[in-house]
Image: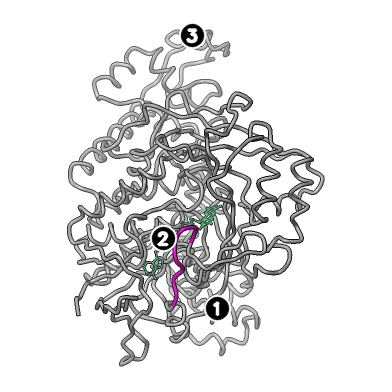
Amino acid sequence: MEHYDIIVIGAGHAGCEAASAAARMGARTLLLTMDMTKMATMSCNPAVGGVAKGQIVREIDALGGQMGEVTDLTTIQFRMLNRSKGAAMWSPRAQCDKARFSQEWRHRLENTENLYIWQDSAVEILFDHSGAKPRVRGVKTRMGVEFGAQTVVLTAGTFLAGLMHCGRANATGGRAGDAASTGITESLVAVGIETGRMKTGTPARLDARTIDFEALEPQYGDEHPAKFSFSDATQPVQRQLPCFLVYTSKEVHDILREGFADSPLFNGTIKGIGPRYCPSIEDKLRTFADKEQHQLFLEPEGDGTNEYYLNGFSSSLPYDVQMRALHRIRGLEDVHAYRAGYAIEYDYFPPTQLRHTLESKMVDNLYFAGQINGTTGYEEAAAQGLVAGVNAALRVQGREPFVLQRDEAYIGVLIDDLVTKGVDEPYRMFTSRAEYRILLRQDNADLRLTPYGRKLGLIGTARWQKFVEKKSRVESLLQYVRSHSVKICEIQNYLISLDLPPLAQGCKIFDLVLRNGVSLAGVIGALPRLAKFVDDNGIGESEIEEAEIEIKYSGYIERERLVADKLHRLENIAIPADFDYASMQSLTIEARQKLMRIRPTTIAQASRIPGVSPADVNVLLVRFGR
Ligand SMILES: Cc1cc2nc3c(=O)[nH]c(=O)nc-3n(C[C@H](O)[C@H](O)[C@H](O)COP(=O)(O)OP(=O)(O)OC[C@H]3O[C@@H](n4cnc5c(N)ncnc54)[C@H](O)[C@@H]3O)c2cc1C
């Protein structure tokens, strides 16, 4: 039997990050996937990032993951969303060339040291039952091959017992064009792991040759596009493609409603719970019954294909109903579809059965990541894959586990939410889920996380050196503006040019930049001695922007930091893993039940469990804290 340190099952967004990280950390890793021509396939929309998801990709990149670079190299349109809002809300989003995205990932994985690839379907996870708890020992495939492993990372996405629906028709499959995966769920249930069903859906894909683009409103990318990766390995996109806006109408809605009786969503065929925030068009018509129009986006699937994705029109209505409705949309009167929209149901495993490392609580050395944990989205999957792969490698190497806190990263929020609160519908990230939004900005992801990436062994020396230099340049600029003052006469013309009142007296440059309407770049332009400092120290545009955000939000940042530090005290009060909650009569029955099920590792985590009240937390504090 061939033996590996780590076997990663599935080469989706979670599996690719997991395998890449584990191998680059030095673990002998096998990536076992059903079809190696479909690595990191974007099963749904051809885009990476967006609100809160864009921040996650920046964090993956800062930690040394690959999604940021792969996205940059395959971007066909880039937009920084929410530019008009505060910096905490800025969210990068890129349309990608789907085929190139997948090829780029495959190229990287095939050329990663310590990483081996095997194309096959895992049908069983093998366990060693000799200890108190089962422990993984390997994986068996459909071709009858058995591989041994110290740790296994499962990232099977939407494939486990996948069932696709289009109207009254259904077929087994992991997604259109792929077989479903069977056997794994059964082998996990046999060792006591709970499972459930979820569902998601996707819209029809359209042939550009049959779309009347002249009738549609284009939506262009940013004039000065940015990029995801903090590394120098990529550049902002040079040539961008537009997306297009299209609108439904009352007539379109009437046609869609004719199909409701045959909708697997509404006639009880689909049992799984779908993503509330990514609803199908039929869900939207039900929820917003009075709305006469919905905006949709036509997004190119690549720059070498005629395929377009109709964002917002996800549906599992019968194919003919979908087509009749599409033909009533302006610009799509003669449209031909490459494939219909459909919904898919699949097995997932409630994530409260996991530790913060994403290791199973029931089975030693078995890690879960991605859609199988009840999340939705490429970014959420990739982030979990990275954390699971890193922790599997750390386990093999006998090193301390890696866990991000809620005030350190959206990834920390994501995983803590999953393992503490669980999911009752597919979980996607939002900025509102993070209590420390000002701390967790996309611009400072590298400052927050690159030191961890370096410590883990995922950030090379050259990149680390560049990071250290950048950090020191930003700090030196902040130090300069905090310690140097500006005189009234020096800045008068600049303020007049902005229609701002003159200074009443000289002040620190820092306080000047705090004023509404004043920008750090503007002050640098107006103050030759500051411009010289910037020049002499080679401080670049992005570093100036970073320093400006630190200045403008300094009050909020300080406040969030204080609250986060307070909470850290609770994070530091540990609860023993085998603590007997049943004996604590002063806890409410609900709290006792929830605490026994989730088994929080700290008082802070206990306080976040729904059903554990502040009074229960006080009881725990008396017992474990003070
Ligand atoms: C129809 C559809 C619609 C979707 N709609 C949305 C949406 O609207 N919004 C959104 O955010 N996300 C959507 N998604 C989900 C999105 O595709 C996933 O969130 C993301 O791909 C999850 O990544 P993953 O790595 O967990 O799994 P996947 O990307 O699904 O990858 C799983 C991988 O595991 C492999 N695999 C599975 N079983 C085995 C096995 N037994 N042995 C070996 N290999 C195996 C597969 O071949 C695949 O490579 C949709 C997905 C589908 C299929």
The secondary element bearing badge 2 is classed as helix
Up-down relation of residue 129 to residue 420 (above or below): below
Residue that label 2 marks: 384
Residue extending farthest right = 290
Using the image, tell me which numbered label, if any, was put on residue 595.
1
- Kindly indicate the quadrant of the structure image that contains residue 265: bottom right
Asked if disc 2 and disc 1 are in contact, CB closer than 8 Å, the reply is: no
Task: Measure the alpha-carbon separation of dots 3 and 1.
Answer: 62 Å
Of 226 and 457, which appears nearest the observer? Answer: 226
In percent of the image, x 41 and y 44: which residue is there?
A: 98
Residue that label 3 marks: 492
The secondary element bearing badge 1 is classed as helix
Up-down relation of residue 318 to residue 217 (above or below): below
Residue 328 colored magenta? no
The magenta stretch is: 175-182
Left or right: 337, with 190 as reference point = right
In percent of the image, x 32 and y 80: which residue is there?
A: 136
Q: Is residue 508 visible?
A: no
Task: Measure the alpha-carbon separation of dots 3 and 2.
Answer: 52 Å
Which of the marked residues, 3 or 2, is nearer the chain's N terminus? Answer: 2
Main secondary structure type of the part rendered in magenta? loop
